[in-house]
């Protein structure tokens, strides 16, 4: 009996007393703390930010370190290798030692670090400039896609009935087409148009980076719309929404003040995953010559330029492929970490 009484006296305290460190903290603060404690997710974020910073420094590298113009052909140019001046295009390349082959990697940041492509252009400089285009289009299209899809989902989920039916059928229409087939079709039509994209006073040239950005954002709208709409439908059935409506709150106030804060976490989780997806899509379209147009470069166009040099100068195609893998991998791991941090069923224990 004494032992049982001792065990009863040593019973654990209520959960609210065990976890004083989370008392009074907002859910966002707890999610940020959980994400900060996820070392793999934070390492992925650091890797992604490092790649972004390096790509943003492309003009600095090209003009001040390598002293090259990566957008101009340089077939007759020369560079320095081991203190000697050598031509960029070397005679007798390949297995049969015929024709000309661009110089390979010198592993010298000042002199064609990754070698030259078939036009004598610095591959390392083009790699950084291509990253600016690929990352810009990927991030821009993902943000535009998530913003439009969220607004449409809020309207459809809140008003329901005919509004929901019309908007959902429009999204199903886009959903019915294969992603790449739809993107290639739209890109081909707009690229072959003399005026590019002309919508009233808005004009986007065929060579503008905004064109693939808007196309990619359009084709992925249903992929964000569907999960967000489901959470909006669930939120509209909650008591706090009914209380706001019964008190005479306007529709805009209910949508953006009561429903949006409860579904924004879904958009935050989807955003890094969508960025990874849109970067892959942009690279595929650019590889097929229906994405980024010359004189601009992207990782997809660099891979296309290097496909004929795979047996002699493989780094022309391998380098952008590695960059795509690192970016997509880091964003997917980061997205998983954000999802775990925002999961309301996750453990609430946060150590100081």
Image (tube, grey):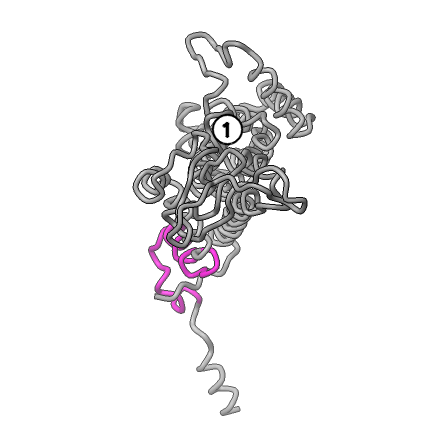
Q: Position of residue 61 (x, y in %)?
A: 35, 42
Give the residue drawn at x 48%, y 36%: 120
Q: Is residue 308 left or right of residue 118?
A: right
Q: Is residue 303 above or below residue 331?
A: above
Give the camera-side residue of 270 and 27. 270
Give the camera-side residue of 273 and 169. 273
- Name of the residue lying farthest toward the left: 64
Q: Which residues are magenta?
A: 15-41
For the C terminus, the image quarter is: bottom left
Residue 97 is covered by the magenta coloring: no
Give the camera-side residue of 239 and 121. 121
- Name of the residue lying farthest toward the top: 200
Can you tell which quarter of the image residue 98 is in? top right
Q: Is residue 155 above or below residue 258?
A: above
Q: Is residue 34 above or below residue 290?
A: below
Give the camera-side residue of 330 and 162. 330
Q: Main secondary structure of the magenta part?
A: helix
Q: Position of residue 326 (x, y in %)?
A: 51, 50
Residue 33 is covered by the magenta coloring: yes
Give the residue drawn at x 42%, y 34%: 70
Give the residue drawn at x 60%, y 43%: 93
Q: Under tag 1, what secondary structure?
A: helix
Q: Which residue is mark 1?
A: 154
Question: What is the crowding at mark 1: few (fewer than 14 residues within 10 Å), some, or many (at least 20)?
Answer: many
Whether residue 240 is visible to the viewer of this picture, yes or no, is no
Q: Position of residue 332 (x, y in %)?
A: 54, 48
Whether residue 334 is visible to the viewer of this picture, yes or no, is yes
- Name of the residue lying farthest toward the bottom: 2
């Amino acid at each position: 009996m004494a032992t049982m009484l001792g065990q009863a006296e040593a019973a654990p305290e209520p959960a609210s007393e065990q976890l004083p460190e989370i008392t009074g903290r907002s859910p966002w603060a707890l999610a940020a703390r959980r994400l900060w404690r996820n070392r793999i997710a934070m390492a992925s974020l650091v890797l992604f930010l490092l790649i972004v910073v390096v790509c943003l420094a492309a003009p600095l590298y090209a003009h001040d370190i390598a002293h090259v113009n990566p957008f101009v052909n340089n077939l007759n140019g020369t560079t320095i290798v081991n203190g000697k001046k050598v031509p960029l295009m070397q005679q007798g390349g390949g297995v049969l030692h015929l024709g000309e082959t661009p110089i390979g990697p010198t592993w010298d940041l000042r002199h064609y670090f990754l070698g030259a492509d078939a036009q004598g252009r610095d591959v390392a400089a083009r790699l950084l400039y291509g990253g600016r285009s690929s990352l810009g289009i990927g991030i821009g299209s993902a943000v535009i896609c998530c913003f439009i899809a969220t607004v449409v989902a809020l309207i459809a989920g809140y008003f329901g009935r005919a509004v929901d039916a019309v908007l959902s059928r429009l999204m199903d229409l886009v959903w019915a087409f294969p992603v790449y087939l739809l993107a290639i079709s739209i890109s081909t039509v707009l690229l072959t148009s003399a005026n590019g994209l002309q919508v009233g006073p808005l004009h986007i040239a065929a060579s503008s980076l905004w064109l693939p950005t808007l196309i990619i954002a359009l084709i992925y709208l249903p992929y964000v719309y569907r999960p967000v709409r489901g959470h909006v439908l669930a939120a509209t059935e909650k008591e706090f929404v009914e209380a706001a409506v019964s008190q005479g709150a306007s529709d805009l106030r209910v949508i953006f003040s009561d429903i949006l804060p409860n579904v924004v976490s879904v958009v935050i989780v989807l955003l890094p995953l969508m960025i990874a997806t849109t970067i892959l899509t942009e690279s595929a379209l650019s590889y097929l010559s229906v994405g980024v147009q010359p004189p601009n470069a992207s990782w997809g166009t660099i891979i296309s330029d290097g496909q004929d040099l795979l047996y002699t100068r493989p780094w022309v195609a391998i380098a952008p492929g590695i960059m795509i893998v690192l970016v997509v991998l880091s964003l997917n791991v980061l997205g998983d970490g954000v999802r775990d941090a925002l999961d309301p069923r996750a453990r609430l224990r946060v150590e100081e």
